[in-house]
Amino acid sequence: QVQLVESGGGMVQAGGSLRLSCAASGRTFSRYAMGWFRQAPGKEREFVSAILWSGNTYYADSVKGRFTISRDNAKNTVYLQMNSLKAEDTAVYYCAVKPVPYGTTSYGGPWDYWGQGTQVTVSS
């Protein structure tokens, strides 16, 4: 059974940094895309970032230049380094995974497995 467990959320002042981690278990995820999404109060869940097993990375325009996604396949873990945080980054952050063909550049469509979420609160 696939399990995703996020950690690293918390409260930080605007301009600060946080690093989220998501540990996956239940299978080998080296051929999976791993991604981060977020949902702010009263808003729909939105894409934040994804990393394919080719190493290609993708970011929402709102976080480009501030967030960095990375993965450690040996640990089945994906990270999201968040710098220069803004109040509008406040949300519950979820990690997700799905299998993708090698060489694909697409991260769209439904994601198969989701974590329980971790709260990030940025105070202005």
Image (cartoon, rainbow, N blue to C red):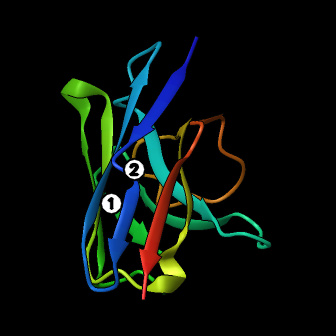
Q: Residue at x 42, y 89 (%)?
A: 124
Asked which secondary structure carries label 1, the reply is loop
What percent of the width, then of the height, locates residue 87?
A: 48, 84
Asked which secondary structure carries label 2, the reply is loop
The quarter of the image holding the N terminus is top right
CB atoms of marks 2 and 1 within 8 Å: yes
What percent of the width, then of the height, locates residue 88?
A: 53, 84
Q: Camera-side residue: 94 or 59?
A: 94
Q: Residue at x 56, y 45 (%)?
A: 117
Mark 1 crowdedness (10 Å alpha carbons): few <14, some 14-19, many ≥20? some
Query: Residue 82 occupies which quadrant of the picture?
Result: bottom left
Instruction: Write down the residue under mark 1.
Output: 56
Q: Give me the disc on residue 9.
A: none
Query: Residue 98 occupies which quadrant of the picture?
Result: top right
Above-or-below relation of 77 to 58: above
Q: Amino acid at mark 2?
A: Leu
Q: Residue at x 25, y 76 (%)?
A: 83
Above-or-below relation of 10 to 46: above
Question: In 3D space, how far apart are the residues under numbered discs 2 and 1 (Cα atoms)?
Answer: 5 Å
What percent of the width, then of the height, locates residue 12?
A: 33, 70
Mark 2 crowdedness (10 Å alpha carbons): few <14, some 14-19, many ≥20? many
Q: Camera-side residue: 73 or 11?
A: 11
Instruction: Write down the residue under mark 2.
Output: 52
Horizontal side of residue 25 vs 41, given as left or right? left
Q: Residue at x 30, y 49 (%)?
A: 79
What percent of the width, then of the height, locates residue 21?
A: 33, 44
Q: Amino acid at mark 1?
A: Asn
